[in-house]
Amino acid sequence: MPAAAQALLRTLVDAGVDVCFSNPGTSEMHFVAALDAEPRMRAVLTLFEGVATGAADGYARMSGRAAATLLHLGCGLGNGLANLHNARKAGVPVLNIVGDHASSHAELDTPLQSDIETVARNVSGWLRRSLSSEQLCGDALEAIAAAHAAPAKVATLIVPADVSWSEGAAPRRGVAAPPTPVVDDEAVQAAAQALGAGPRAALLLGGRALRAPLLQLAAELAARTGARLLGEVFPARMQRGAGLPVVERLAYLPELASVQLAELEQLVLLDARVPVSFFAYPGKSAGLLAPGCRVHALATPREDLHDALRRLAGHPRLPPRRGPPPLQVAARPPRPRGGLNARKVCQALGHLLPEQAIVVDEAQTSGVMLPAFTAGAPAHDLLALTGGAIGQGLPLALGAAVACPGRPVIALVGDGAAMYTPQALWTMAREGLHVVAVVLNNRAYAILELELQRVGAAGGGARAREQFDLARPSLDFVRLAEGMGVSARRADTAQGFVEALEHALAHPGPHLIEALVPRAYSGLKLRLLPRLLSTLDRLPQPMARAIQRGVAP
């Protein structure tokens, strides 16, 4: 058995990397063979590289540790780039092990030869090609340390086949990540002064700040000062629900987010970025803050956020603690009835969501009511589409289920997004994971219908609308799921959906529910929504905020 591949596996496991989401090829066969000699490594086979990389992201979000991906050459890495982009934006550790041709083979320019470094560079915060079997395990340790160092990142290690099969490697043990730097006193002083503006100040939480215990500390600061508590649009992982601090997430639509931010004079960032529009729109500013609003970065992803919050809480400028911050009251919406629509799907989830569930939200327009209906549900984790590259929902749920085998995982996915990575269902079945995939089938890329009008594009006739239509032919997700070993049901009534969800939550293993729903914004509503949004900045703030809550809670 080749020593290098065995030594690499032992090095990975000893350093805490004991899960590998794989889609191997010929250049990785020595790594695959070495799995028989290292039973501590859990190798999870995926049928597409985008599933492997998305699953590694979900695993990292829930465990706080890197999983490995095993990918085949530049083409395999390229297939996984979209979900590595999402992982990079989520700020989580991921370790890519990318096999390459043997060093002497590269000069022959064979069909699969490519520039792997160029493919990897855009998503990798750390990148190296291992040049010898003697260096391999040391390179692997440096990759793991880099992936976990603040800010957490994607690390990519390229392993030529001859490095893997050669003798001379010896397992290596840990290289600690460098200490996380603390923020300077000036940043703490500026944040304390800014919070003195009370209701005209806000704490914007992102990344790590949306999880306990940092979330609790931030909520206490907001309660003491009267500042508002805001959350980023697409959190990597947000702990929410009954008994947890109430955080108002910023809206995706810039017209709505600008209403949320309009009255602010001071904004303190906690592991978050300055809020801007997701896309550019003709004649509109990308900035969402009111003119004159001052921004203070208390702690960036590179810095010790816990230390920054602790020092801010003890600053003499802040008022004394008045008591615990307000927490979300336990409340569930009633059981939905009648015909099925996206709103009732979200209502049913709020009605039935179990304790400590993990909710993956890639529902696009169909999930607009999800935050409102699940706000008072039992405490749960929410994982969102951090980088905007769709096709993340099912793989993210897969990785989260591997990381947390005792917790139910519910993935809310739009029909278009589900078709990017449906192969994740096969791996869920193979691994026996308790994941409930809810596919909201409205037979359209509905969000693009909305965006067509919002960008001011001319036309919008039959040929343009065909680019958003998924009804010719209609997708059958029940048959797709059953063909990959997943129990599946279709629902077109609220009662049928609730019964399907109750069954899926009560029975371990993977399930898919195809929810047949009309488009969230359709017909007259779709045509009027951009016009309504364009008027929000000209309305009195109380009225604008009321409309905002009605359009996107």
Image: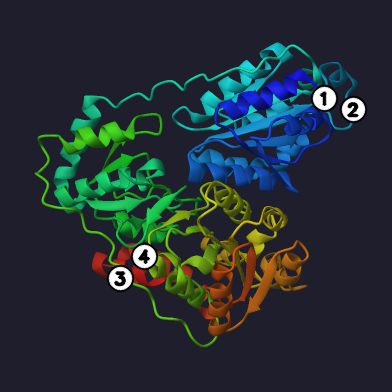
Q: Amino acid at mark 1?
A: His
Q: Are marks 3 and 2 in contact (CB under 8 Å)?
A: no
Q: Which residue is denoted by mark 1 in the rendering? A: 101
Q: Amino acid at mark 3?
A: Ala
Q: Position of residue 415 (x, y in %)?
A: 64, 66
| Distance of label 2 from label 4 (alpha carbons) | 55 Å
- For the N terminus, the image quarter is top right
Q: Which residue is denoted by mark 3 in the rendering? A: 546
Q: Amino acid at mark 4?
A: Ala
User: In this picture, is 303 found above or below 199?
Assistant: above
Q: How many other residues sit within 10 Å of disc 3, few (<14), some (14-19) or many (≥20)?
A: few
User: In this picture, is 416 found above or below 102?
Assistant: below
Q: Which residue is denoted by mark 2 in the rendering? A: 110
Can the viewer see residue 336?
yes
Report the mark closest to the observer, 2 or 4.
4
Report the mark closest to the observer, 4 or 3.
4
